[in-house]
Amino acid sequence: MDYRVRRVSGDRRRLDIQGMRGIAVLLVVLYHAGLHVPGGFTGVDVFFVISGFVITATLLGDLESLGQIRLGRFYGRRVKRLLPALALMVIVVDVVAILANPVASQHASAITGLTTSFFAANAQLYLLGNGYFDFKATIDPFLHTWSLAVEEQFYFVFPAAIALVWRFGRRRLSAPLLAGIVVGAVTLASFALAVELSAGHLLPAAHRPEQFAFYSSLTRAWEFGAGALIAFAHVAIARLPTRVASTTALVGGAAVIYGAFHLQTGALPGYETLYPVLGTGALIAAGVGGFARSPVNAGLAVAPLRWIGDRSYSWYLWHWPFCVFATALFPGVGVAPPLAAAAALIPAALSYTWVENPVRRSTTIQGRRIATLAFACIAVPAVFSVALLGANSLLSRTHGLTQWRASNVPHIDVVHGCHDNVPLGPQTPASCTWRVAHPQGTVVLVGDSNASQFSEAVIDAASRQNLNVTDSTFYSCPFVLIRVINDSGAEKPCTDFVQQSLRWIEQVHPNLVVIAARTDRYIESSSGPGRYSFGPYGGKPTYDRDEKARLYTTGLAAVLRQLDTNGIPSLIIVPIPRIPTQVATCAVILALTNSCSQSVSRASSDRELKVARASLAGAVAQSRLGHLLDLTSVFCTASRCSGTSGDTLLYRDDEHLTNSGSLRTTEAYLKAFVAYARR
């Protein structure tokens, strides 16, 4: 029985499989570059299936021809093939990361780099608590190494397990049959575990079971197993008619494409992952017995795809750090990640030519020299990662990074737990009221996160007028009486929050109610993540900008009329200018030079806020006691708007203030309180 991967034109590789590798790495790179391939992360699943098939076919060929698996030779080949290129990438990225790394991932990325050298990045990322799609994970230049850790763990365990089962089977029954049964059983068990953990059905109280399902080699083993089972059935599959092979390839290719363009960010290795896994398995199976008999497989074997496939490992290694560093060094420049991903082909090609091929083809690196090579490829990059930790510790004492840390201090209402859908009333924590010694009344602050950011300023200004402050905000919910539907189609419970808070406000009769929200974001967003639709009660929601502006005016005017009826003055805050600021993803070098925030023209900011400002003004015009406060002049001159003041960061992202930025608005609030608060 011949289990070996058949030679094609004298090449032991399946040329169509090299093309599949090319497709897989293209999907991953396009996804990471932010281009329009929402399920491009499934390219990793394609790699897993290919690895399962190729490694199993190689092992079975050795068993058939030699009667045993020479584990030393197998592991030696893996060391020479994988470790030098990986070590080089870790070393270079550690050096570049000293200045190019996003400041928010300084420590975490150094630790991930260290665990990458020991093939345990997947465990580190799981224990760190960062899901693959979480923001904190996406600024780690070593995030992509989780899949390499899974593969390396497979390479470490699988050959030894097959050798053990084969030896046991030869004494009792057909060794290939027993090995195939064992691999099939493990594959099914791994898939079942992945499905259950992804859905949170197993161990619901455990430490993030969904993330365990994503990162664990136990829940990814079934993907390798799918490829391995094709290798076990190699001979039977080769007998399938050409027409069946062609149809199989067509269906398999369609499944892979469907997964790449229809699976969404957040998909876990469960039922949805069957598309790329079974699709890849079908493509591999269709090429068994000669890829030329399937037009799809023959197309995969074309030279350009094979060229990319040959360099897929190196390109996979280099593309993600390039994307992360480009985003950090050029914040807000949308073309930076795609250009960086493409540029990563340069070090990938150099690594392939001068590191990968010379080492894996070397006849002098044998025996103990392989062990020495493995030790060096683990120890040297590990030392560089430890050095990165030390460099980060020294840099953290600089003024620029001290400012960055200050920009990440949460607002005081967040510290006191006043920002999480708790309407004003009996359930509002007592800590959400800031009291003065001899109060002459109360100011109430309500709204979304853009109200939360003014907590420091409102409390400071109110205390100087001997006024208490009660604060309760609900992120992503404007304080208006309309239906708010988020991008997933779910109606947010904003109305309950607003209505209950209004009832409490009417009872306590505060001296002033301050209402703030990111009005322009709600009105302008019509597509993509973070979009909102509005609807009247009992009516159909809409994404139309002009209609949303009208509904916002109507909903806010309804709130202000209720306050008017009870003689309660209100202060409506115009959204602050949006200024490109990516403090968390900002490169260390930019933080050191106080360059994490940019500036925009006053004219462009005014244009951007024109519709929102008009909507708010329309609601205030219908109110007897409503007043508008525009804070634009705090952050803008007549010509420019800036997110910094000297070397102080005023913005923590495009539309939210730091604590220092909040306090910059204190004087404006103080004047408004003097003018409008009921006495």
Image (cartoon, grey):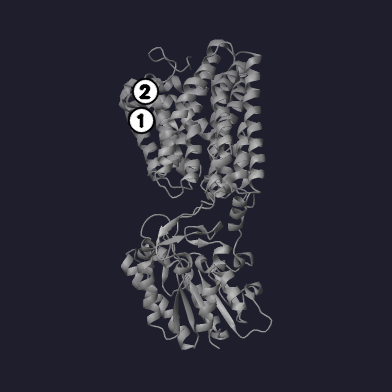
In this view, the residue in front, 267 or 181, is 267
Q: Quadrant of residue 148?
A: top right
Q: Is residue 488 visible?
A: no
Query: x%, y% of residue 151?
Result: 55, 31
- Whether label 1 touches label 2, CB < 8 Å: yes
Query: x%, y% of residue 528?
Result: 39, 54
Give the position of the C terminus as an image quadrant: bottom right
Element at label 1: helix
In this view, the residue in front, 168 or 211, is 211
Instruction: Residue under label 2, please give it.
Output: 240
Query: x%, y% of residue 445?
Result: 54, 74
Relative to residue 222, is residue 546 depicted above or below? below
Instruction: Residue under label 1, please give it.
Output: 248
Q: Is residue 18 visible?
A: yes
Q: Quadrant of residue 349?
A: top left
- Please tell me which residue is depicted at 54% across the width and 52% down the height of the picture: 594
Amino acid carrying label 2: it is: Leu
| Residue 68: numbered disc | none
In this picture, residue 216 sits left or right of residue 552:
right
Which mark lies nearer to you, 1 or 2? 1
- Please tell me which residue is depicted at 52% across the width and 23% down the height of the picture: 55
Mark 1 surroundings: few (<14), some (14-19) or many (≥20) residues within 10 A: many
Amino acid carrying label 1: it is: Thr
Q: Label 1 to label 2, Cα distance in Å?
A: 10 Å
